[in-house]
Amino acid sequence: MSDMKLYRRLLIIVTGIGLFGLLSACQTGHPYSTRYHNGLPVGNKAKKIPVPAIVNKPEKPVKRMLSAINVRKGDTIYALSRRYHVTVRALIQTNHLKPPYMLYPGQRLKSPATAIHTVVKADTVYSLSRKYRVDMTTFARLNGLKRPYILTIGQKLKVPGGPSGKASSGAVRKALPPPPPRSGKGFMWPVKGPILSSFGPKNKGYHNDGINIAAKNGSYVRASESGVVVHAGRKIKGFGRLILIRHSNGWLTAYAHNSSILVKKGQAVKRGQAIARVGKSGGVNRPQLHFELRKGARAVNPVKYLRS
C-alpha cells in the first residue's frame, strides 16, 4: 500500500514539473513585429516554441525595489544596473555621478525609483517603451519578459525612472510641433508591391502589428498622410532605419527597414511626400517596407484604411 502511495506522489510531481516547463516555455508574446512570414532576419532561426491554448500565466508578484545600493569591491555602474534591473542613466542621474563614474567599496547609492504600470488592452512592450522613453531591451529585462513578449491585462510592470518614479529622458527634450491637419484624402499606400506578411497572428506565437510590402530596393517610401516626424533613426532594434509619423486625431504610422531616411525628427511632411528609400536594414532578407498604422497605442490592420 505504501509503495502505491509513493508511486502516485511521484507521478503527481513529474506531471507538475512537465506542466510548469510547458507554461514557462510558452510565456512569450510579440509587441511590434520583429519577425515575418517571408522576412525573417538572415541567419536568425527562431526556436520552435509550443503554443498552448491558454497563454495567460499566473502573474508573478512584483519584487520591491531596494531603497539603497551598497557598492561592493569590483562594482561598476553597468554591473549595478544589471544586478538591480535599472538603467545606467537612471543610476547616474539619481546619484548625481560625474564621469568617469568611479565607485568605491562601502559607498551607498540611492536606488532609482520605479513606477508601476498596469497593463490595459492594446498595451505592448513596444508601445510602453515609447510611452516611458526607454528602449525595449531594457524594459523587457527589467520585467523578466521573454520574446515574443505576451502581456496580459492587469499585469503589473516596472518602469525604469528617476527619483520621482516617472520615466526619465536624461535631458530636456525639445517639444515637437503638433501635427498638421490631415489631407482629407485618407491614408495612402506608402509603396506599391505585393504583401509579404499580412496583419495578425503568425506561426510560433508571433504577431505582425502591421504589413510587410515587397518593393524595389531604393524606391521611394512616401508618407501615408500629412503629419510630423517623431522618430527617424535606428534606435529601435530589429527595424533598421525606422520613421514614425504622428498624425492628427491620435493616429501614427511606422515605416521600417529603409535603406536611407530623407526626413528628420520634428519635420512636418505632406501626404505622398518621399520620406525614405526602400531597403532591408534591420536584418530582413529582401527589400521591403514594414508599415504600421496605429490609433493611439492600438495597432490596426492598415489594409482596411489604405486608399490608392
Image: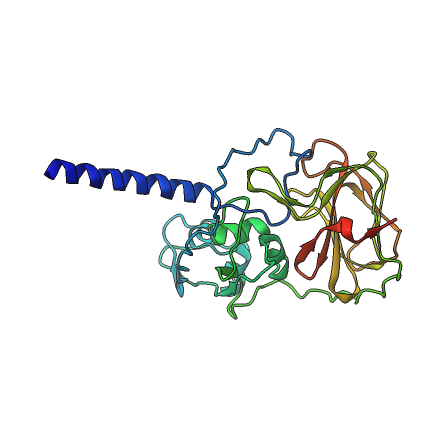
Location of residue 231 in the rendering, given as x and y in whole percent from the top left corner = 73, 54
Note whether 248 is above or below 34 in the view shown.
Answer: below
Q: Residue furthest left?
A: 1
Q: Total of numbered circles in the picture?
A: 0
Instruction: Name which residue lies at 61% across and 58% down.
Output: 122
The way the protein has been coloured in the rendering is: rainbow
Location of residue 259 in the rendering, given as x and y in whole percent from the top left corner = 78, 39
**Residue 174 as seen in the image, left or right of residue 33:** right
Instruction: Name which residue lies at 85% across and 59% down.
Output: 226
Note whether 15 is above or below 224 in the view shown.
Answer: above
Judging depth in this view, the residue of 20 and 149 nearest the camera is 20
Q: Residue furthest bottom?
A: 164
Location of residue 106 in the rendering, given as x and y in whole percent from the top left corner = 35, 58
Judging depth in this view, the residue of 236 and 192 nearest the camera is 192
**Residue 83 as seen in the image, left or right of residue 266:** left
Judging depth in this view, the residue of 34 and 10 nearest the camera is 10
Judging depth in this view, the residue of 151 and 167 nearest the camera is 151
Where's the N terminus, which quadrant?
A: top left
Location of residue 46 in the rendering, given as x and y in whole percent from the top left corner = 56, 34
Instruction: Name which residue lies at 52% across and 51% down.
Output: 140
Q: Quadrant of residue 257?
A: top right
